[in-house]
Amino acid sequence: MHTDPAAEVFRGIRAGLPVAVGYVPMAMAFGVLATHTGLSVLQAGGMSFFVYAGASQFAALGLLAGGASALAVVLATLVLNFRHFLMSVALSRRLPLKREGHPLYPVLPFVLAFGITDETFVVASMEERLGIRYFLGLITTVYLAWLSGTLAGAGFSSLIPPVIARGMGVALYAMFIAILVPGVRKSLLNGLVAVAGGLVAWGASLAIPSVPGGWRIVIAILLASGLGALVAGGSADEIIREESA
Amino acid sequence: MIWVMIAGMCLVTFIPRAIPMVLGRRVVLPGWVRRWLSFFPYAALGSLIFPGILTVVEGRPWIGLAAGGCAALLALKARNAIFPVLAAIAVAVGLQLALGT
């Protein structure tokens, strides 16, 4: 990485903005729901601060409202968020943690790992010049959006009219599409894998409605990317793309 | 009790996120696993977009599809994802207003 360090961080921040636009309304909805479920503003904010995993936070509220025990909520959280293990495996191959002598080196992997969400994973994965500073800029931006959205939602109830809130619900999907399109233009196989991923996730939700959303994604990732790897066979370009990081 | 629960949620979310990142490249993976990993982002994107995009507005799956289609068209031109995102929000809000909520 020979570019200016500050510019690297700034590129990450800019890449985080579309994610932040999607996170704020979702986090506000979480904050509102959390206070309605009986959590204090501090507890709602604390959950976003310490757990930082949207789907499982909503699930926790649903379980609490249904009278579930704390243990049940923790187990459900483990099941829902295990998909981040797969994402962390993939990202760890591309984030070069080489500077062993650096004073921040021992904590850096933990900081980077805490920032892994569905959204930061896909944004970072599509970035060809992925570096640690870029990733730090990205995850800090979206983390602050999640946190401030939660506090705003919990503290001031709903500031956003429902029509706008529902409209903003499309933001993350639009962002996923916007980062998928360039990848598909690079190679149709990428598009094929994405379509397979969507179909597997859909099929899993129809076949076993009780399977939690997180596992639909785990199943879809393993099967659809396996298909991609089989079709790609020995063609070397994918491996080179990863090794060059 | 809520704080104990939050601490538990924090641990079970953080540990799976952290293990691969801490081990990093010290684990050497064979070529076929790396090829498999290289497709993870695309498979994840597909499963994150579909079928969720159908539920943006409850009972009106085509509003999500229209907004998503608009984002896809703009993404062919735009360098940054922010323009497709803002346009998709505008389409989703506009369609709801035009058709009544």
Image: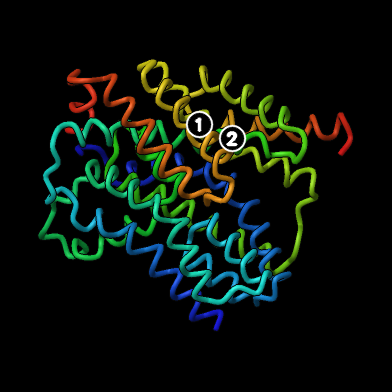
Q: Residue placed farthest to the bottom in the image?
A: B1
Q: Residues within 10 Å of mark 2 (few under 14, many from 20)?
A: some
Quadrant for the C terminus of chain B in the image: top right
Q: Dot 2 falls on which chain?
A: B
Question: Toward which corner of the image does residue B63 lie, by quadrant?
Answer: top right
Residue B32 position in % (x across, y down): 18, 31
Q: Is residue A71 left or right of residue A4?
A: right
Q: Is residue A7 above or below residue A195?
A: below
For image coordinates 19% across by 18% down, the residue present is A235
Q: Which residue is mark 2?
A: B51
Amino acid type of the residue tagged 1 in the rendering: Gly
Residue B29 position in % (x across, y down): 14, 41
For image coordinates 28% across by 32% down, the residue present is B38
Q: Is residue A179 left or right of residue A28?
A: left
Q: In this orientation, does residue A157 appear? A: yes
Residue B62 position in % (x across, y down): 72, 27
Amino acid type of the residue tagged 2 in the rendering: Pro
For image coordinates 46% across by 48% down, the residue present is A215
Q: Dot 1 falls on which chain?
A: A
Q: Is residue A110 above or below residue A68?
A: above
Q: Is residue A38 above or below residue A53?
A: below
Q: Residue placed farthest to the right in the image?
A: B100
How has the structure been colored for display?
Answer: rainbow
Q: Residues within 10 Å of mark 1 (few under 14, many from 20)?
A: many
**Pick the front one: A143 or A195:** A195
Question: Residue A198: which numbered mark, if any?
Answer: 1
Label 1's element? helix
Q: Is residue A57 left or right of residue A223?
A: right
Question: Toward which corner of the image does residue A62 lie, by quadrant?
Answer: bottom right
Q: Is residue A164 above or below residue B60?
A: below
Label 2's element? loop
Q: Are marks 1 and 2 in contact (CB under 8 Å)?
A: yes
